[in-house]
Image (cartoon, grey):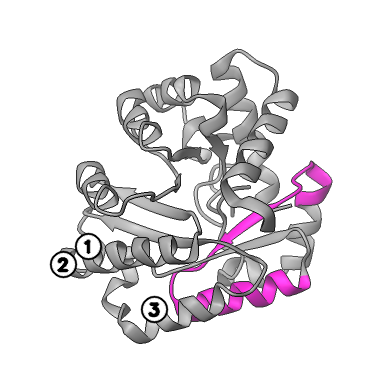
């Protein structure tokens, strides 16, 4: 599961059981992402208790107004923990429900620079902002990472793959109306393909209305495999290899 929020209050009360169900379903690794400094710290505490969990630390575009030099110093310190494999969740959201655009752009750019300093990939949130997000990424040579919960069609996916980014598909790819998203999932090269839950959000079609959790990533994998006309087992293994290449020696 290449993206979850295990520190979310909706998962805290039975988190041990949630992680056990994921393992029973065949999920061997969960990347849990911070949204600000406090949630990044909580997520690291979870990873200390659960060996299958790795962590991304970062300031989400919704929290971009909190970004300042102190936040950068805090992320730099947190990233020294061997369980941290990426900076994230960072990015740009122009849906109108996020922080002011100027604050988002500054936080995103400066976290991209910090990721290059630390030689870490980034976990990127993009909503209604593909062109702007790519323009900012292009300012920081050598940026690498994944686009989480990808929500567009094949051409948009190709624009990210051309920049060396992996494209990650969440439960939304299973929704009947999202044919263009399944077309994108079929077109992304296997070496650039990831799947995720974004738990506790965006449960797949077979679980609509439920709290999402990492075990359900198998539903998403099955739909992506069907879109590619392959079987889920070998595709899951290939996705695991892609995640290992992206997140590096701290991932296994």
Pointer 1 residue: 105
The image shows residue 198 at horizontal and vertical percentages of: 53, 52
Looking at the image, residue 162 sits to the left or right of residue 22; the answer is left
Of 154 and 177, nearer the camera is: 154
Precedes in sequence: disc 3 or disc 1: 3
Label 1 crowding class (10 Å Cα cut-off): few <14, some 14-19, many 20+?
many
Seen at 21% across and 54% down, the residue is 94
Q: Which residues are magenta?
A: 22-49
Seen at 67% across and 37% down, the residue is 241
State the CA–CA distance, disc 3 to disc 1. Answer: 15 Å
Give the mark toward the camera: 3 or 2.
3
Pointer 3 residue: 72
Q: Main secondary structure of the magenta part?
A: helix
Seen at 51% across and 33% down, the residue is 192
Label 2 crowding class (10 Å Cα cut-off): few <14, some 14-19, many 20+?
few
Give the mark toward the camera: 3 or 1.
3
Precedes in sequence: disc 3 or disc 2: 3
Looking at the image, residue 241 sits to the left or right of residue 190; the answer is right
Pointer 2 residue: 102
For label 3, the SS is: helix
């Amino acid at each position: 599961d290449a993206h979850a929020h295990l520190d979310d209050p909706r998962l805290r009360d039975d988190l041990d059981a949630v992680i056990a169900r994921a393992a029973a379903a065949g999920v061997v690794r969960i990347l849990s992402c911070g949204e600000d400094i406090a949630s990044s710290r909580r997520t690291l505490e979870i990873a200390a208790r659960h060996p299958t969990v790795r962590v991304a630390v970062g300031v989400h575009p919704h929290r971009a107004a909190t970004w300042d030099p102190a936040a950068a110093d805090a992320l730099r310190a947190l990233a020294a923990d061997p369980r941290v494999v990426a900076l994230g969740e960072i990015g740009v959201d122009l849906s109108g429900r996020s922080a002011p655009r100027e604050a988002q752009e500054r936080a995103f750019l400066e976290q991209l620079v910090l990721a290059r300093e630390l030689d870490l990939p980034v976990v990127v949130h993009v909503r209604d902002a593909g062109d702007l997000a790519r323009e900012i990424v292009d300012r920081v040579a050598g940026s690498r990472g994944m686009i989480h919960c990808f929500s567009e069609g094949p051409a948009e996916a190709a624009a990210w793959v051309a920049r060396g980014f992996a494209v990650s598909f969440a439960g939304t790819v299973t929704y009947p109306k999202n044919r263009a998203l399944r077309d994108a999932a079929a077109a992304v090269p296997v070496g650039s393909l990831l799947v995720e839950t974004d738990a506790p959000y965006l449960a797949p079609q077979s679980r609509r209305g439920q709290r999402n959790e990492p075990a359900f990533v198998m539903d998403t994998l099955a739909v992506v495999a069907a879109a590619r006309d392959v079987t889920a087992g070998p595709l899951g293994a290939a996705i695991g290899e892609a995640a290992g290449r992206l997140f590096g020696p701290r991932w296994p």
